[in-house]
Amino acid sequence: MLVLVLNAGSSSLKYQLIEMDNESVLAQGNCERIGIDGRIVHKFRGEKHIFEKALPTHFEALNAVVSLISDGELAAVSSLSEIKAVGHRIAQGGEGVDKSMLINDDVLAVIEKSKELAPLHVPAMLSAIDACKKIFGADIAQVAVFDTAFHQTMPKKAFIYPIPYEYYEKHGIRRFGYHGTSHKFVSKRLAQIVGGNLSEMKIVTCHLGNGSSVTAVKNGISIDTTMGYTPLEGLLMGTRCGTIDPSIPFLLARKENLSLDEVEAILNKKSGYAGLSGVSSDDRDVQEAADNGNERAALTLDILRYQIKKYIGAFAAAMEGIDAIAFTGGIGEKSWQTRRDVCKGLEFLGVKLDEQLNKSLNGEEAVISAPDSKVKVCIIPTNEELEIARDTLNLAK
């Protein structure tokens, strides 16, 4: 059965066409700069193809993708009718949405309601759903896979904020957590490669990239995570500040004569790696600058790695033990320096890294802890698209 997986961003549309009989990717790519000028990076049979093409909306982007995968030299299918279902990554589902859902009018209303929690992402995702109806027809099975669903297992003591309780009751202000599809996939895959029983394991998953979060997965479920009501909380990220003193935004507004919107933009778009290092929001650029003696770049890396280590310790305490640590995401998979520095000093928990093996790997799936390490340390390349496709297959059937 063929499943098309879509991940719509505010100005992008990532896609994968997956044959679920053997879980192989037939075609994949990304429509970039939607609403600006338009560009498609398409991968087919191991080769990359780039097309400059006007993409005014997500409808034109999806139409272009459908043409690529069903017509001409790069066609992966002979007819659109071969695609039986579409799975959508949905950034936010709100409270109570703890599983993926077949999209109908009720589910669309749930997604619509979550707009204010993810204002950049949800409208684009709704546009992609609507485009699928127009292109594939109203009868195609469409599935919403919510990024927040995995974290709905958190206990109240982990997700309630210590502000007046009425704001939780009136406005639903609570910790939601994000990257749930990735944390779910990675924790399951880790248990498989180390030969453990997921329902009996205590795992810390570290999804590290332009957006980063750490999650405590106990017995297969999320019990705590670093991102909060929005994806701004937790670790410092590419342009996001992560957790800071809540008084700082008020201070900035008064001292710099800024509006609330301007302060929000600073914390979301001008902080993190970019604001601290003054170099870039990309870990690779900051690492290169640090290697060349840039002290602010080195400080930025030190802060992130310290924060990750601190959360691992906190989550080990919350789970009353730890069996394994997983690194995933662009930084987690490819920065051996980050993995080294995070694990250094965690020997008291039973972590012992194979430093030579760690340094030699760049994105490959592997166990990188020493054979006698009590805590397994792994690199697990995340595959959110496959996790979405699996849920889509199950619901579409």
Image (cartoon, rainbow, N blue to C red):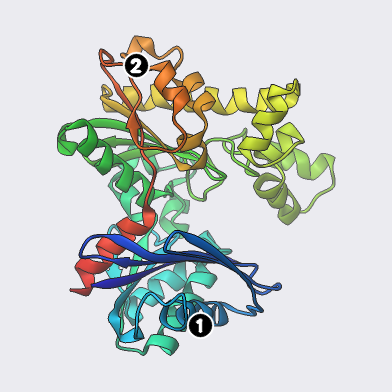
Label 2: element kind? loop
Mark 1 or 2, nearer chain start? 1
Distance between the alpha carbons at the discs numbered 1 and 2: 49 Å
Q: Position of residue 290 (x, y in %)?
A: 70, 25
The answer to whether 106 appears left or right of 197 in the picture is right
Which dot, 1 or 2, sits closer to the camera? 1
Would you say residue 126 is visible in this rendering?
Answer: yes
Q: Which mark is residue 351?
A: 2
Is 133 situated above or below 337? below
As shown in the figure, which amino acid type bears the numbered disc 1?
A: Asn
- 75 relative to 306 in the view: left or right: left
Residue 95 in view in this figure: no
Q: Residue at x 47, y 58 (%)?
A: 171
- Residue located at (72% from left, 56% from top): 261
- Across and down, in percent, residue 66 comes to 45, 80
> Mark 2 and mark 1 in contact (Cβ < 8 Å)?
no
On the image, which quarter does residue 315 sit in?
A: top left
Tell me how many marks there are. 2
Residue found farthest to the top? 348
Residue at the disc numbered 1: 63
